[in-house]
Every structure is written in C-alpha cells, then in structure tokens.
Amino acid sequence: MSRIGVFICHCGENISRTVDVERVAQVTARLPGVAIALDYKYMCSDPGQNLLKKAVAEHKLDGVVVAACSPRMHEKTFRNAARAAGLNPFLCEMANIREHCSWVHEDREEATAKAIDIVKFTVSRVKKDRALAPITVPITKRALVIGGGIAGIQAALDIADAGHQVVLVEREPSIGGHMAQLSETFPTLDCSQCIMTPKMVDVANHPNIKLYTWSEIEEVSGYIGNFQVTVRRKARSVDEDKCTGCGVCMAKCPQKKIDNAFDRNLGTRPAIYVPFPQAVPNTPVIDRDNCTRFKTGKCGVCEKVCGPGAIDYGQQDQLIVEPVGAIVVASGFDLYNIGPKPADSPYEGYGEFGYGAIPDVIDGLTFERLASASGPTGGKILRPSDGKEPKQVVFIQCVGSRAREKGISYCSKICCMYTAKHTMLYKHKIHDGQAYVFFMDARTPGKNYDEFWRRAVEEEEAVYIRGMVSRLYQKGDKVVVMGSDVLVGVQVEIEADLVVLATAVQARTGADLLAQKLGISYDRYNFYSEAHAKLKPVECATAGIYLAGACQGPKDIPDTVSQASAAAAKVMTLFAKDQLEREPIVARVNERNCAGCLACKKVCPYGAVEEKEIRDRNGNLIKTVAYVNPGVCGGCGTCQATCPSKSVELDGYTDEQIMAMIEAL
Amino acid sequence: MKHDFEPKIVAFVCTWCTYAGADLAGTSRMQYPANVRVLKFPCTGRIDPVFILKAFQKGADGVLVSGCHPGDCHYMAGNFHARRRFAAFRKLLEFVGVDLARLEFSWVSAAEGGKWVEVVTDLTERIRTMGPLAEFKELETEEHWSGRLETAELKEAYNNI
Ligand SMILES: Cc1cc2nc3c(=O)[nH]c(=O)nc-3n(C[C@H](O)[C@H](O)[C@H](O)COP(=O)(O)OP(=O)(O)OC[C@H]3O[C@@H](n4cnc5c(N)ncnc54)[C@H](O)[C@@H]3O)c2cc1C
C-alpha cells in the first residue's frame, strides 16, 4: 500500500475563494493509499515547503501530490523540496487546481468537485510513478550564431571574449545586416558605419570566431549541449584563403550593370562583387546568375587579372558539420513590401500608393542609402526618377504597421524615431527643403528619444500632420499626396518631390523554415517566440536555443544589442557547467518483447532510435531490436503510441500511469 | 445555471501548447464550464487511441484531444503522427458505435487561451444536448466481456459464420 501525502494550497485566496480546500483535504484523505492530506495558505512559501518536507519524514511518504498552481509554475519548486526530504523528485506531482480550476470557474460546488477529481487522478498517477534518475550529458562548449547583423555580431563577440569558440553563419557575402545600410543612427546621429565596422573587423580577427559568410543552415539535429549543425557553404567561386581583397577583379569585370541590392537597387555593381566597400570578409563572390562566364562560358576576365589566382569557377557548395552546445538565432527582419501581394505572402500591399511603381516613392531604408556618404549618390539626397534635389519631401509613417486591413496589427516600434531622424538628415543636407510627416501617434519611449523627436519638430522645422494618407499618384514630375489632418479636420494635398514610406518591420521571409529546422516556435507573424514574454525574453522554449535582435520582434539597435548580450550571457551560463542534467523523460525499449519492426524508428522526430543486434554467446544473431539513445531522445512518446507490441515506454508517461489516471476519472 | 445533465468531458492535451493555452485562460481569468478534466501528455504523439476508448469506457461522455498547431510541434512532428493516427482511429470508433461528434480534435496554442475556452465550451454544450453516452458504458459493466452470445442477433450471426 502506498503512503501518499496530499498538500492543498490556498494560494492566498486565489484557490480558496472558489475551491473549498478543507473539503478537498477531507475527501482526499480518505482515498486508498493516502497517508495524510493537509491544506495550507501558501505551499510554495518556505513554511509551506517545510510542511511538505516534515510530512515526508514523519509519515514516511512514498509519494507526494501538491494541489496548487500549474506545474509549469512550481513543479520544480516542489520536486526540489521532495528531493531535499529524501524523496525521489519524480514521485512528486502537481494537481493544477488554480489555472485549470479556481480561476476559470465561479460556482464553488462545481469547482470543489472538479478539484477533488483532479487530486484524485493525480494520486492514482503518483501510485504508478517510478523513481527516475536525472540523465547527465556532456556539454559541447561551442556556440553557433545564426545571422551576422548587429545582434549576431554582438552575441558572437561576447561569447568569444568569454573564451568559447563561436561559429557565426551569415547568408550574405558580408556580415553587417541592416545596420551596415544605415546612414546615421538615432538618437545621437552618429554614423552607423563608424560604430559598426570596428565590430565587424573584431569578428573577422577574433581567434575564437569561425566566420562562414555566404552560408546557410542546412540541418540541425541533437539537443541542448549537443547539437550537430550542418552548414552549407555556398560556392563563392573565389578561394577565401588566396584572395587578398585587392579588388582588381571587380574593377575589370565587364558586366557592371547589375542592380545593387545593398543600395536598394539605386546603383549597380559588377558580377563579381562585395556588397559594400567595408565588407567583412573583403572577399568577393561571383553572382553566377549574372556572370557572363557562367552564362555563356565566354569571358574569364577576373581569372586572368587575379594575381594570387584565387578565382575558382569550379567551386562547389560544401557541407560542413559543426558540433555546438548552444545556438543564438539572430536572423533579423525584412521590410513590408508595398507591391502587389505575392502568392505566398499574407500581406496585401498598397494599391493606393501605386504598388511601388512610382519611382519617387521610396521606403525608409532606401532613404538611408541616399543619405549615406558611402551610398550610390555619395550622400547627396537626390530623387531616383531624375536625380534632382527634392525640395518638398513627405514622410508617411505606419505603412503596413498598425494596419489590420493590411495584415499587421502590431507597431513596428522604430519608425517614429527613424522618420524623425530622416527629417533631420534631410534638413541638414537640403537647408531650403521642407519635410512633412503624416503620423498616427509619435511613439518615442526610450532614453533621449522624445527629446530627439521634439528636436525634429521644434528646431528642424519638420511639419507633423496627424492623419493618414489615402492616395499617392504621379502628376507631372510631382507625387501628389492626398491625406487628412485630423487635428484641424481638413483634407490635405501636398505636391511632393519625394515620398518616403516608413514600411513595417516584418519577420524574415522564410523565417518559419529556419524555425522548423531548429525546432523553435514562432508567432502568427513568423517572429520567433521567446519562452516567456516577461521572464524568459531571450530563451526559446526549445532548450539551448536563444534569440537576439529583430528576429524576435521589431527592435532598435540599443534593444538589439542588449538582447544579444543577454543571449550571450545565457550561453555562458550554460557553458559554465561541464555536464548538463536533463529530465529523464526518455523512452526505453523492452528488448525481450521488441519484435524489431522499427515502426518507432520511422516516427521518431529526433532520430533517437537505433537498431541493436542481440547475439547469443557464440555471436549468432538472435534478433534485431530497437534501441533509444537517451541522450538524443526528446521525450515526445510518439514511439510508444506507435509500437504495436507496447515494447517501448516513455518514463514519466507510461501506459500504467496514464491508465491509472483514466481509471480514476 | 443548473442543467439536468452534466456531461463528463476528458481532455488529452500536450504540455507545450494546449496545456499552456489552458493555463493562459486561467491567468486571464476566463470562464468555462467545469465539466472538463485535463490529462497532460508531453505531445499528442504520445496519445494512444486506446486511452480514448478507455476514457469512454470509464464514463466520459465526450473526449477532446488537443495539441500544437501543425508546424508548431515542440517535437517537430508528433502532432502530425497524432493526426494521421486519429484519422484512422475515427473509423474504428464509428464502427464500435460511438457517435463521432463525441470526439473532438483541435489545435490550441500556448497563446490561445480564448480558443481553449471556446473549444471546451462548445464541446460541453454539444455533448449536453446529445445526452449521456449509454451504449459504450455498458461494456464497462461487462468488464470481462468474453463474447457470450446473449442476444438473438449475435447468436444468429455466430451461427452464420
Ligand atoms: C530604415 C531604418 C532605419 C533605422 N534606423 C535606426 C536608427 O537610427 N537607430 C537604431 O537604433 N535602429 C535603427 N533601425 C533598426 C536597426 O536596423 C535594427 O535594430 C537592427 O538592424 C537589428 O539587427 P539584427 O541583427 O537583429 O537584424 P538584421 O540587421 O536584419 O541582421 C540579420 C542578419 O542575419 C542574416 N540572416 C538572415 N537570415 C539568415 C539565415 N537564415 N542564415 C544566416 N544568416 C541569416 C542577414 O543576412 C543579416 O545579416 C533602423 C531600421 C530601418 C529599417
């Protein structure tokens, strides 16, 4: 006969207000196998935990049920208390009578009856619980960082400075991300390149950082402490070891008319290129889709002019497996495209703004390139259609953001600030120009942010018009902006030389695919989900994977850098141990019954099931059975529900435990 | 409001999505009928159809199976296996004589406290109008059902084999 202790928590009044906790104690005390049932005001408090520990010793309990909040809240607390009292922690279970009962029901009688039921089936389960020993696994103290924007750069540098090896994977030819494209940055107006490029160089020179640019994540397997990551190094057609970065190939390339995506297609670049002059690494890539040599077989100029002989037209994609213990995802964001809706996008685009076909209607990032000293115009703000200096510029905020009808209801957070910045950059370059801003609200929380915005309005004379724009159209060489000023209550029409749209920050296209490779979750907008909105803002629910930067949601640089350093700190905390204890919720095979059909192997999402040969003393094969590698098993239990002969069992969720609960219903 | 019949609803849910969604309904103080009893699994992939049969046999009038949305499984693909398995299982259940309206499958994410409330409320209301599950429960009283040929139809069927 079991000796189970039941502890019912009042949770102040959170539970006892709707559940008659004394009655629950009285009824459950009479259940077979229950040695003692008590109720207490706060079970999670120190005295509450002591009550539990004392009862375990006094009543020689061999199982404990704590009826309180969700196990997601306090299971660890009570299992630790049980362990301290000398009980195996896996013989302690929680009955959730708060989130699943007292908080969601009003009728005291119904709630009490339900609470009793919940405790009852939990008691039945505990009777079938087995003592489990935690599994320890070694930790590979190397980290993978995905994405070389400012988030990935910061995280990689922090981890590398702590003495651990870092593999940094960036899919573009250079690291830098969006920050490398910015001109000056709010709230201080310091030049983005000036603060960014030293960090990029640090990455390239750091002895602990292995940098793979022009590379992508192919496959991820394993688990916290022990991931295996396959990286695809796309063929660069240039040998990185031989190339000196002299740039002669780029200068001599006859094909120079390719739109430069880094400059938002305002300028052009050759077929062999680095995206921008300060690129890290400074090794060019051949754009095979546009290279004459690859298209027609004729050319080969770059090979001829390359002194060190670094050009390699035959280079192939390379797959490299990197073992790592932790992963930081820092893959950043994309911008809302106002063009017509592509088939695979949930976003509507802006027909009322001409679907992006009006040449002098550009987005904020394009404006950054126009204002940037290293941009296509050398920092002169000239409009794309005819290269003239625009004297009237209209900025429109919340394009795609906070626009439910366009598919996005969130605020993109950075646009109020960068639009204020744009009006200043414009005024500083074109003194007789006038900037207008259409806005819904000015959202400027952040240190020195509101002051910055006020400066744009009060000192730099940007005219802020509160209201929305309903239409943009071309009239002669002007773009007509039709909007409303809701404060004055009038319609406004401005003939602008240039219109700049603060388009929404959206998740990377394909962010969901990367998430599926990593086994992490994402929200309805494809931003990656943190484990807890408040208390675990950098951890993923999947252990060992952390988030940094705009891949988790719209963020400015200060927030991105803070989160990146926080993610790095989490990785360092993990790496401070040599061994990792993990929950022993893993599947085990009963080799005697196993018929070796390996149906379990087919369904296992982790590849944890291996084939094992059973031989007799003379080495003759008796049979092949399934074997579950406990280090790899994730503990989902799909194998067990699949096994036709019930020969595999998930510890902690055995058929016996579950049937006992159902029996008690 | 009191009703004549309070159905017993058993929910088999995964810990990562639906259990957390039900927790969220709690922290948000949403209200729903008290008929549901929630059993937690690591993943819907762990849910053996036998559990559902057992629940009906043990007096459940309705059963809910709920896990992560397709593509959101914490274990990558457990919910896909579950979906396939239950598609086949429904046929069997129908054959056994349980009205399929008594079994509900849904995806409720950790962020969908409201959806959890909706799913549980709808199922409870539906089962309430359907009344208790009588047919199948009789099996429980014949726990050791050994195929005794008691009804005329069964006897005849046996003789015709
Ligand atoms: C117009 C504009 C102006 C701005 N101005 C300011 C400002 O003045 N001040 C300020 O604080 N903030 C500003 N911001 C915000 C700032 O750009 C972001 O905070 C910052 O870039 C976020 O950095 P990140 O590293 O998270 O993302 P990103 O900069 O997007 O970097 C992500 C990196 O990951 C790489 N990547 C993506 N997917 C993969 C993959 N699957 N595998 C490998 N690599 C991948 C990308 O190529 C990229 O290099 C501005 C933003 C915009 C759009």
Image (spheres, coloured by chain):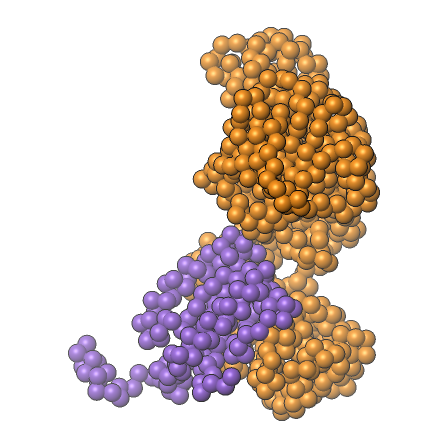
Q: In the image, is A182 to the left or to the right of B105?
A: right
Q: Residue furthest left?
A: B160
Residue A471, image x, y percentages: 54, 36
Residue, x 64% and y 11% (percent of image)?
A251
**Location of residue A10 with respect to A226 vertically, above or below:** below
Q: Nearer the viewer, residue A466 or A425?
A: A466
Residue displayed at 52% across by 19% down: A290
Observer-nearest residue: A316 or A273? A273
Residue A65 image offset from top left, x and y in percent: 66, 79
x and y percentages locating residue A120 in the rendered image: 59, 83
Q: Residue at x 60, y 68 (%)?
A: B25
Q: Does residue A640 appear in this view?
A: no
- Residue A564 rendering spot, x and y as whole percentages: 74, 44
Question: What colour denotes chain A?
Answer: orange
Quick one: B105 or A134, which is closer to the camera? B105
Tell me, yes or no, if residue A270 can be seen here.
yes
As drawn, A190 above or below A477: below
Quarter of the N terminus of chain A within the rendering: bottom right
Relative height, residue A562 to residue A247 (above, below): below
Describe residue B87's horizontal placement relative to residue A522 as left or right.
left
Give the chain coloured purple: B
- What residue lies at 65% left-to-right and 68% top-to-bottom? B27
Q: In the figure, residue A162 lies in which quadrant?
A: top right
Q: Is residue A505 left or right of residue A557?
A: left
